[in-house]
Amino acid sequence: MPELPEVETIRRELEPLLVGRRIDRVAVHRHDIVGFPDADVFVRMAAGHTVTRLARRGKYLILELDRERDLVIHLRLSGHLEVVGPNVTPRYERARFALSDGRALSFAEPRVLGKVYLVMRSHYPAVLAGMQGMGQEPTGAGFTPRYLADALRGRRASVKSLLLDQRICCGVGNIYSDEALFRAGIRPTRRAGRLSPVEVRRLARELRRVLDDGIRWCGTTMADARYVLPNGARGRFQERLRVFGREGRHCRRPGCSGTVRRVKIGNRGTRFCPVCQK
Ligand SMILES: [Zn+2]
């Protein structure tokens, strides 16, 4: 699933192609791709608006439109956004936004799990309530060691499962939580409330660093290629992963003789080096 670095990469790639363009027509090929309002209302209401800015909140991409509307897009597992010419229809296209420059923003999603929402900026509907309860952006100024310490204090859950909690670390998913814990030298099964202040500080720092690195390398494209950039290119952070997707292989830290292990935590596959992570 695209996480913060992948959605941020998509945001940066699409922004120059969309800002200042008006959405002239909207076509929805699968009604269940529309999360709010009803699909026929969505089609009518989204047309005629101009894109003013692209924003991101956690794993949600937000096309800010004129007249206080937001077009919110959640890619889920395999959603793909692309700006295409008028005669190009990508496979699995579910919704299409024809733009004033003759091109179109196409939203393809083989599984139809992704969603688009058209909402008033001042009032997000209950169906998007998860966005209001979201925690700090881990790459933002508000994500301080103290913030993370407060969120983990007294918690009996594993540190891995709390890193995946969008109310604490929004935008973080399975890849970057495993990588941050490796870099911080913390075993993912540890009880969150038992981390020392030094470990919490290290974790806050490494989480920010690994997400920044992920953005710098345009995200992670695994072998299934569920995530690619809007122009079809692959991300390049997968070449730099230390534990994610590397179970059974040698730890990449120089001098370490450990083998990366995989366990399940809360039904999520979790990778770590038993030598480097205490
Ligand atoms: Zn190791």
Image (tube, rainbow, N blue to C red):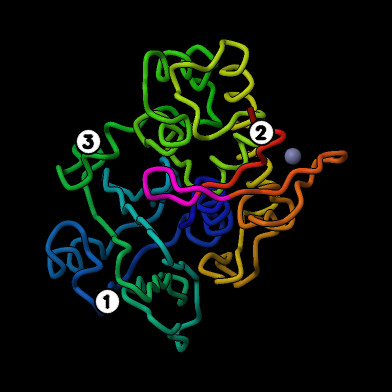
Identify the residue under disc 1: 27
State which region is magenta.
262-269
Give the image quadrant in which the ligand numbered 1 is located: top right
Real-space Cα separation, disc 3 to disc 2, in angstroms: 32 Å
Ligand 1 closer than 8 Å to the CB at disc 2?
A: no
Helix, strand or loop for disc 2: helix
Residue at position x 43%, y 67% from top? Answer: 78
Comes first in the chain, label 1 or label 2? 1
- Asked if the residue at tag 2 contacts the one at tag 3, i.e. Cβ–Cβ closer than 8 Å, the answer is no
| Residue 94 or residue 251, whichever sits in front | 251
Does 263 appear in magenta? yes
Spot occupied by residue 43 in the image (x, y as percentages of width and height): 20, 69
Identify the residue under disc 2: 209
Which tag is nearer the camera, tag 3 or tag 2?
Answer: 2
Residue at position x 37%, y 76% from top? Answer: 110
- The amino acid at mark 2 is Arg
- The amino acid at mark 3 is Ser
| Vertical relation: 227 (above or below) 256 | below
Label annotation for residue 122: 3
- The amino acid at mark 1 is Ala
Real-space Cα separation, disc 3 to disc 1, in angstroms: 26 Å
Spot occupied by residue 201 in the image (x, y as percentages of width and height): 60, 17
| Residue 159 or residue 213, whichever sits in front | 159
* Relative side of 102 to 247, left or right: left
Comes first in the chain, label 3 or label 1? 1
Q: How many marks?
A: 3
Residue at position x 34%, y 73% from top? Answer: 111
Look at the image and tell me in which quarter the C terminus lies: top right
Magenta span main SS: strand
